Image (cartoon, rainbow, N blue to C red):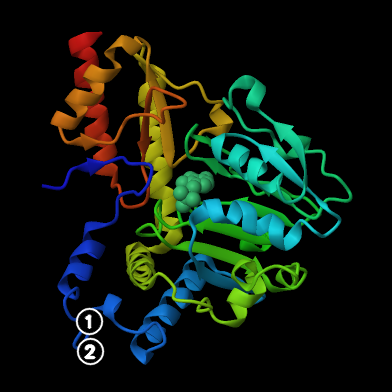
Amino acid sequence: MRKWNFCAGPAIISEAVLEEVKSELLEFKQVGASIMEISHRSKTFMEVAEQAKNDLIDILKIPKNYDVLFLQGGATHQFSMVPYNFGHNNGQADYILSGTWSKKAIAEASKITKVNTIASSEAKNFSYAPDPKDWRVNQNSAYVHYCPNETIQGVAIHEPPDINKPIISDASSVILSEPLEVNKFSLIYAGAQKNIGPAGLTIVIIDRDFMELGNQQIPNILKYSEHSRSNSMLNTPPTFAWYMAGKVFKWIKQCGGLEYFREQNHLKASKLYEFVDKSSFYLNNIDIKNRSIMNVTFFLKNDELDSAFLQEAEQNGFLNLKGHRSVGGMRASIYNALPLEGVEELIKFMTYFESNNG
Ligand SMILES: *Cc1c(COP(=O)(O)O)cnc(C)c1O
């Protein structure tokens, strides 16, 4: 039986999507084989691939001067691909340090280019995110990189920064949760396994003019421009993950698009935060203006009850609430496919657990 799944990633996928995939798993359309057993260059797959791309362009209202790439290697691969392509321009780049993932991005980029960490919330244990108004951008940096939603801490920068520099965003855990002003960014990347589909696929949305500034001396597999020229088929792409992402995009459209999910996600998050804030048993220590709408972290004031909480939660049908090992406590990832009912049921369980243990 399927349960309420709060996993941070690979994360919950809509049951409607899984049912549809199941129904065409053995034979896709009338081609005599499954979608994962045919050539990525076949007409059948090319149509699936193009449809998925067009639906994503539709959902995010991606302007014509951007390309959308379907790559591999996860967001982690982007940590080095970005500086390999653009770090040579002026030989330095600005980074914002707001949590575990941006820290990893900085560590990788530092091997490839000169990194200026121009704002950091590390001294306060990432309990807030540096306000873009306080970022001291270097005139000579090639780009500014930040992570709008730190999945592990549950810390978000909700508004895209207004900066006169190419902005690069690791949107892995927040993409498709609400409408996005794509034109504020030069490059947006996201691993698929949070809000898009199964692991193995990475989406890159890139300004074509910016892309052409990329270093031409690096291997093709690292070059955005080369992936773009070959329609993300420089080599065999992750066809099954691409196909499934396409199903998710269709499902998002059928639900009412990103306006619908913005409303639902804000409702889910605010209900959960409100409950935690009112309680004397649970707590969240992230600055209110930086609270994530996708990854809600919370603690039990008495952490000796953590393992009992997790065990009882699982017995009652709530999976993967354990916080990241580096942070401790709990984390409820409430991506698009987790309905409001799941959050309401979680709050009921948390109320019940408090009344038994408070
Ligand atoms: C999950 C995640 C990553 C890492 O993604 P991989 O696909 O495992 O490389 C990077 N950044 C953010 C914000 C994430 O949520």
Q: Which residue is at a point 22% across and 10% down the rendered structure image?
A: 357
Q: Position of residue 231 (x, y in %)?
A: 54, 80
Q: Which mark is residue 193?
A: none
Q: Judge whether residue 174 can be spotted in this image.
A: no
Q: Quadrant of the C terminus?
A: top left
Disc 2 on helix, strand or loop? loop
Q: Position of residue 323 (x, y in %)?
A: 38, 29
Q: Is residue 190 left or right of residue 22?
A: right
Categorize mark 1 by other alpha carbons within 10 Å: few (<14), some (14-19), many (20+). some
Q: Which residue is at a point 47% across and 69% down the rendered structure image?
A: 56
Q: Is residue 167 above or below residue 125?
A: below
> Is the CB of the residue bearing disc 1 within 8 angstroms of ligand 1?
no
Label 1 close to label 2 by CB (< 8 Å): yes
Q: Nearer the viewer, residue 328 or 38?
A: 38
Q: Position of residue 272 (x, y in %)?
A: 36, 31
Q: Which mark is residue 31?
A: 2
Disc 1 on helix, strand or loop? loop
Q: Amino acid at mark 2?
A: Val
State the CA–CA distance, disc 1 to disc 2. Answer: 6 Å
Q: Is residue 353 left or right of residue 284?
A: left
Q: Which residue is at a point 37% across and 91% down the rendered structure image?
A: 43
Q: Is residue 345 above or below residue 218?
A: above
> What residue is disc 1 on?
28
Categorize mark 2 by other alpha carbons within 10 Å: few (<14), some (14-19), many (20+). few
Q: Amino acid at mark 1?
A: Phe
